[in-house]
Image (cartoon, grey):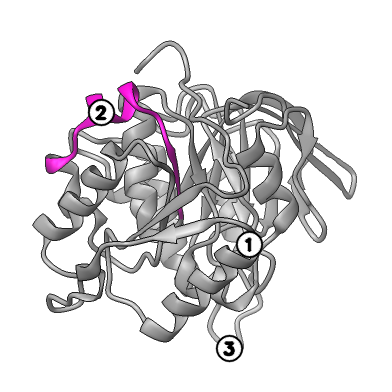
Amino acid sequence: MPSEIIRPPALRKGDKVALIAPASSFSREGFLAGCERLRQMGYEPVYAQDIFDRDIYFAGAAERRSRELNEFWQREDVRALICVRGGYGANYLLEQLDFDLFARQPKILLGCSDITTLLTAIHDRTGLVTFHGPMVAKDLAGGTFDLSSWNNCLSGAAGWEVRTNGVEVLRPGRARAKLYGGCLSMLVASLGTPFEIETDDTILFIEDVAEKPYRIDRMLMQLRLAGKLESVRGFVFGEMLDCLPPKGESYTLQQVIMRVLEPYKVPVVFGLRSGHVSDGNITLPMGVQAELRAEGSDVQLKILQAATEK
C-alpha cells in the first residue's frame, strides 16, 4: 500500500463533473433529474453519449465503461467523476484501469454500493482519497443526500463532524485511524483477488441492503476468517436498510453483528446513513484519518484531515 495519501483538487462552483456508469444500467428519467440537481448546485455535468447503452444488466459493455472512466479521468477540464448508479459490474473494469493515471492526475471519484469495488481498489493501489456517498440517478435525483458532508468532503474542510443522529452504540470506546470501507458484499467479493481490501489500522465502515441477517453473519465471518478484522480499530455500520430477521423471530441484526465481532474489543456503532439509506445519504472520505467516539448513547465521528486540496 502507498505510505502517503493523495488528495484530489477540491470541487468548486462552475467545475465540470463527469457522470459515469461503471456498473448497471439506470433510469434515464432519474439520470436527467440528477443532472438538473447538479446544475442547480452550480456544477456543469458532462457525460458520454453512449452512457445509455445496455448490455444485459450493465450500462454497456465493459470496454465502454472502462473507456468512459479512463477518458474522463484524462480530461484536464473535468474535476470530479460521479457515478450514476451501482448495481453490479464495476469489477469488470479492474483489469483495464490505469492506476498510474489516477495517482498522477488525481480527481474526485464518488459513488457507493457496487462502486465500493473501485473506491477501495483505487485507494489501496494509489493512496488516492475516494468518496463513498450519493449517486446521480437516485440520491441526487431525489434530493436524498446530506449536503453538509458533501460540501465538507469536496471543498477541503478538516476537523468536521459527520452527522450521527440515530446512530446506536453497540460497544463503547474510542478509535483514531484511517476511515475505509463500503458495501459489505463488495468488500467480501475482493477476497482472494489481486484487489483484496486492506483493512489494517482502519475505522472500518460497513453497509449493505436487503441482506438477511444470516448472510450478513456469513460475510462478516468470512472477513474474520480471512484475518481482515484483526487490526481494525473501530467499526461503523451503516443503516443496513431492509436487512431484517424473518417475521416472528426475536433476534436483531445488532445481536448477529456483535456475536461475530465479540473477539475485537474496539468501538462498534450502528446506523450511519451512507450508501443504501432511507434518506440523507452522507458523503464519507475514504482514506483520511478520523476519530470515532462511542460513549453511552453518544456517537461522534470526526474527520480529522482534509479530503481534498483547496
The residue at which mark 1 appears reads as 281
Verify whether residue 100 appears in magenta: yes
Three-letter amino acid code at disc 2?
A: Leu
Instruction: Confirm whether residue 126 shows in the render.
Output: yes
Find the distance from the CA under tag 1 to the CA under tag 3.
28 Å
Quarter assignment of residue 288: top right
**Where are the magenta residues, as a range?**
96-111
| For residue 133, above or below residue 197 | below
Find the distance from the CA under tag 2 to the CA under tag 3.
50 Å
Instruction: Please report the residue visible at 19 percent of the width from the left and 69 percent of the height from the top.
Output: 50
Verify whether residue 276 appears in magenta: no
First-in-chain label (2 vs 1) = 2
Q: Quadrant of the N terminus?
A: top left
The answer to the question of whether label 2 and label 1 lie on touching residues, with beta carbons closer than 8 A, is: no
* Residue placed furthest toward the top: 3
| For residue 123, above or below residue 279 | above
Instruction: Please report the residue visible at 19 percent of the width from the left and 57 percent of the height from the top.
Output: 65
* Residue placed furthest toward the bottom: 247
Q: Which mark is residue 247?
A: 3
Q: Which mark is residue 101?
A: 2
Three-letter amino acid code at disc 3?
A: Lys
Work out whether residue 169 or residue 38 is closer to the camera in this orientation and state it: 38
Quarter assignment of residue 37: bottom right
First-in-chain label (1 vs 3) = 3
Q: Quadrant of the C terminus?
A: top right
Q: How many marks?
A: 3
Three-letter amino acid code at disc 1?
A: Asn
Instruction: Please report the residue visible at 13 percent of the width from the left and 79 percent of the height from the top.
Output: 56
| For residue 128, above or below residue 70 | above
